[in-house]
Image: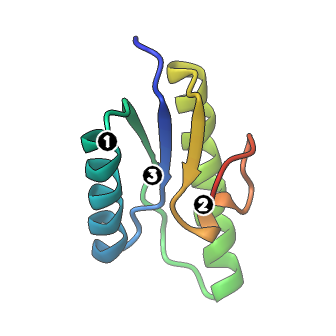
């Protein structure tokens, strides 16, 4: 697999986040970057906001780890603070 210029770590937990991530990916690709997306797996509903952030952050970390291994990106962009909360590698948020 070709090395990605940018890895976009996406929660994708809402339609709005998915749309924003698609727009960001499109903009990066129009600028000439090879973009790989690491999308967090869907998570169950939980009782508190703090636990919600934790389960989604863990899912984003797992997706990012796998994508970093697969794509060896030059840069990483975490699309939300929650996606960056437990980041496995430094990047922009």
Neighbour class for label 3 at 10 Å: few (<14), some, many (≥20)? some
Left or right position of 3 against 88 = left
Structural distance between the alpha carbons of marks 1 and 3: 28 Å
- State which mark lies toward you, 1 or 3: 1
Q: Element type at marker 2?
A: helix
Quick one: 93 or 85, which is closer to the camera?
A: 93
Disc 1: which residue: 31
Q: Residue 73 appears at what percent x and percent y?
A: 56, 27
Q: Residue 41 appears at what percent x and percent y?
A: 45, 51
Quick one: 93 or 53, which is closer to the camera?
A: 93
- Label number found at residue 41: 3
> Which residue is found at the position 37% from the left and 70% from the top?
17
Structural distance between the alpha carbons of marks 2 and 3: 12 Å
Q: Residue 68 appears at what percent x and percent y?
A: 59, 29
Neighbour class for label 2 at 10 Å: few (<14), some, many (≥20)? many
> Which residue is found at the position 39% from the left and 62% from the top?
12
Q: Element type at marker 1?
A: loop
Residue 15 figure quarter: bottom left
Disc 2: which residue: 83
Q: Element type at marker 3?
A: loop
- State which mark lies toward you, 2 or 3: 2
Asked if 33 appears above or below 56 in the picture, the reply is above
Left or right position of 72 against 13 = right
């Amino acid at each position: 697999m070709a090395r990605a210029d940018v890895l976009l770590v996406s929660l994708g937990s809402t339609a709005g986040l998915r749309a924003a991530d698609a727009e960001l990916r499109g903009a990066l690709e129009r600028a000439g970057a090879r973009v790989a997306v690491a999308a967090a797996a869907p998570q169950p509903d939980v009782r508190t906001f703090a636990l919600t952030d934790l389960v989604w952050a863990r899912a984003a970390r797992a997706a990012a780890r796998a994508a970093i291994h697969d794509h060896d990106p030059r840069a990483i962009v975490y699309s939300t603070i929650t996606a960056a909360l437990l980041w496995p590698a430094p990047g922009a948020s």
